[in-house]
Image (cartoon, rainbow, N blue to C red):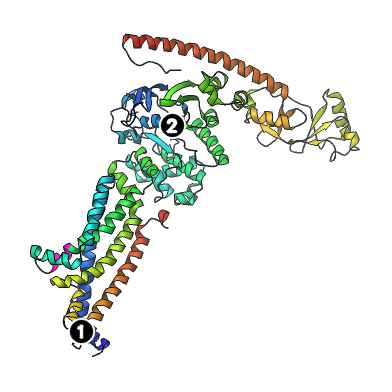
Amino acid sequence: MPETTEAAGPPEGARTSTTGATIELENLTKRYPSSREPAVDSVNMEIKAGELVVFVGPSGCGKSTTLKMINRLIEPTSGRIRINAEDVTDMDPVKLRRKIGYAIQASGLFPHMTVAQNIALVPKMVGWSKSRIRARVEEMLDLVGLDPAEFQGRYPRQLSGGQQQRVGVARALAADPPVLLMDEPFGAVDPITRDHLQDELIRLQRELHKTIVFVTHDFDEAIKLGDRIAVLREHSHIAQFDTPEAILTNPADDFVSGFVGAGAALKRLNLTRVRDVEITDWPTVTVDDPLQEIFNKLRSSGTNEILLLDRRGRPYKWLRRGDLMRARGSLARAGTLVHDTVTRDATLRDALEAVLIDNTGRVAVTGRRGEFTGVVDMETLMNSVHELLEADRLEAMEHQHELEEARAQQTHFEQEGVGGGEAKA
Amino acid sequence: MNFWQYLSSRHQQLLTDTYQHASVVFQCMVVATLIGVVIGVVTYHSGWAGGVATTTTSTILTIPSLAMIGLLIPIVGLGVPPTVIALTLYGLLPIVRNAIVGLRGVDPALVDAAKGIGMSGPARLLKVELPLAWPPILTGIRVSTQMLMGIAAIAAYASGPGLGNEIFRGLASLGSRNALNQVLAGTIGIIILALLFDAAYVLIGRLTIPRGIRA
């Protein structure tokens, strides 16, 4: 990563420009003198530039140790680490760490420094000018969704857990590192805040394209965030390293499927958005339409229900045939209220939940301002899920084939006395 | 001659003694703080070295001050040198102990974070560990100062400076007209000085402990 921040850096006011770097771990091993078994045993892994890779595994499996070897907070006993093809295993660790963002559980903010001072630490160490640092602090606070004017001068203890964590991420990204390491960063916040922070991270990553290595023990978090997930078992052995889809539909072994837990198909629904499935049109009327027209539409639509929209085009009520008769022609009393709608960005799981709750067997999809854009029904959902699972299965089988080939090759190399090779499955 | 008359007739001498008392305590505290913090910084990493430092300094504290000053006289002579040496040695313990406790009490996660964002060892110590350990260290300095105020009075035995001279003069001439006045003037002067120093430390705390970690 020689062309990063020190010399030129991004022009003032511009958004972060350094995108991710590749990370290669080769036979990375950590042994502690106190125990015979290595804590991390010969990890081989290639992480692509701009990829978000999640290490997930039970506690004590060495995932954190593996992460900390990447910025050499823990010195590897043997093996090599390469970032952007540059061997950093013997580089000055202090210099190395200034080019690698680091965010930890409970934010790790220094309590005696203000938010601005915390964020400015790394830019100051790499020698940015004062004006550039000031602009950068504001930019970073903006980026993580905190108002710079309000938050710069506060001390960490004057922030909520979620806000602290955002500042922690801002500090990690302040000097525009190509790589970001996150060690269970959202482990200490409540579930709702955690959900928000995860969404924020996804948004950030879409903007910044850093290479992120994220450690968690929460498999659902891994599925939500990871482009690829490395499921680790004891001694950091990689049980499976693949896309969330492939791990869910085709876990490599019993350990992985145990970790995936029950309801893999349901979890798969979290990975697909409503926009990815077919949204069908549905006959609608608005509250301003004359009653006669509504009657006609109901009769001619060929469906049992018709959707009544309010004046702004938002779903309001489901009208069934006969509803109007029973309510003696009063729209105010007729029909059943629409309980739940989903946006195009909602996951299929949200859509399924809404369909199950709504007794019509379908859910209205709304646009930005809540206006009606179509419906998704049970049948569409089922068909898409089947298609998805089938596609995942094919893909996973292909991957497995590739991995087996790679493994065969590695065995071949090892027999020839040459170490190294591809990631193990 | 009553106490007030005594004060007004000797105020020149008393002010000089008071000033010298404050000055010797202050200077010894500065030296003791520097040495104490350095000892703390050097030893807090290892359980063994930290233990040795704490035990040594507390052993020094158990030596009676009169004996300590008496033992120093044949080595460094009379006057200021034995006073300064003795006071500095006595002042060390609370500072060393609190420096070690304070530095060890810094949240390891924060040290980890400091390392992780690329701070070098000295930067970590100066910007993170010492500022976070500063409140307990300051408490140690405060305790030390209170102690030295009293011990400094003994320095008069070795012809040292300070309000101890008043007390010793009074004790030496018990029964004479001004004996009680002299002892009282010395003692009250020391108490007032101690209170003033304490107030100063409260102010220093306000000024030097960052708002983010102030209790």
Which residue: 34% across, 32% down? A72
Give a yes or no on whether discs 2 and 1 share a subunit: no
Residue type highlighted by circle 2 = Gly
Is A401 placed left or right of A328 in the picture? left
Q: Residues within 10 Å of mark 1 (few under 14, many from 20)?
A: some
Image-quadrant location for residue A26: top left
Name the subunit of mark 2. A
Residue A147, horizontal then vertical, whole percent: 51, 46
- Which region shows up in magenta? B79-85
Magenta-drawn stretch, dominant element (helix, strand or loop): helix
Which residue: 34% across, 56% down? B136
- Can you tell which mark lies on residue B72? none
Residue A195, horizontal then vertical, whole percent: 56, 37
Residue that label 1 marks: B179
> Which residue is nearer to you in this view: B198 or A144?
B198
Residue B69, horizontal then vertical, whole percent: 15, 66
User: Which corner quadrant holds the N terminus of chain B?
Assistant: bottom left
Residue type highlighted by circle 1 = Ala
In terms of secondary structure, where does tag 2 sit?
Answer: loop
Image-quadrant location for residue A17: top left
Which residue: 20% across, 66% down? B65
Is residue B12 visible to the viewer in this orientation of the structure?
A: yes
Distance from label 2 to label 1 (Cα)? 74 Å
In magenta segment, residue B83: yes
- The reply to whether the C-beta atoms of the residues labelled 2 and 1 are less than 8 Å apart is no
Residue that label 2 marks: A60
Q: Residues within 10 Å of mark 2 (few under 14, many from 20)?
A: few
